[in-house]
Image (cartoon, helix red, strand yellow):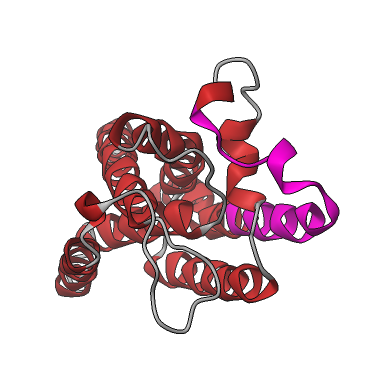
Amino acid sequence: MSDEGAGARAAAPTAQAPWLWIGVAALLGGGALLAASAEPHRLDWQPDLARAQPWRWWTAAWVHWSESHRWANLAGTALVGAFGWRAGCTRADALAWLAAWPLTHMALWWSRPDLAHYGGLSGVLHAGVVVAGCALLRDGQRRWLGALVLIGVTVKVWLEQPWLGPLQRWPHWDIAIAPAAHASGAMAGMACALAAHVVHRARKRVNA
């Protein structure tokens, strides 16, 4: 087999990887739609039940407290999915976002054990944005864009002042917001993105 053919074969998994990213976005969004007919308190994040009912580490992201909350997060899911696609996220990036899903709630458990109930996609979406932003840092021509995205997420989380309390009331929202979930998602996303970076570098060495 020629070197050109071998290179094309090695590149194929990476070229197909954005579909995996879209798959994670579809799982998040589809679950949120299905959970609309479920009893929220059977699925939402409750730190007191986290050990006894481990499904909440995942299902909490699907719970929404109002229709506007759900549809705003579904729109956000579509945007993060498109962003990751355009960023060229690899299989490792998609798996990093998937891993950040329960880790977001683990970080929330650690940072705000006083948050008795939580539901929504926004924490995991923040994780996805961070993972995709880190993916752009690997692209020499678009590294500046990845840096701007990460700076933007950092500034956003800081301005939300998650240390003020477990819940806050924001204008134009019909529910209380948990900014700590956004911070937890960003931290989980960064940790998982670093792991994805290690995997990416290891694959490059193997394929070199």
Q: Which residues are magenta?
A: 23-47
Is residue 165 highlighted in magenta? no
At 39% from the left and 50% from the top, the residue drawn is: 181
Query: Of all residues shown, which one is farthest toward the right?
Result: 37
Q: Is residue 26 left or right of residue 197?
A: right
Task: Identify which residue, 89 or 58, lies in the foreground.
Answer: 58
Q: Quadrant of the C terminus?
A: top left
- The location of residue 137, given as percent across then percent down, is 20, 60
Q: Is residue 166 left or right of residue 65?
A: left
Q: Is residue 181 above or below residue 81?
A: above
Residue at x 20% of width, y 60% of height: 161
Q: Up-down: is 130 above or below 152?
A: above
Residue 42 is a magenta residue = yes
| Residue 172 location (% of width, % of height) | 47, 84
Rendered residue at 18%/68% (across/down)? 159
Q: Residue at x 55, y 16 (%)?
A: 51
Q: How many marks?
A: 0
Q: Nearer the viewer, residue 57 or 200?
A: 57
Q: Is residue 58 above or below residue 130?
A: above
Q: Position of residue 139 (x, y in %)?
A: 23, 64
Q: Main secondary structure of the magenta part?
A: helix
Point out residue 191 in the picture as x, y percentages from the top left corner. Answer: 27, 38
Which corner quadrant of the image does residue 68 belong to?
bottom right
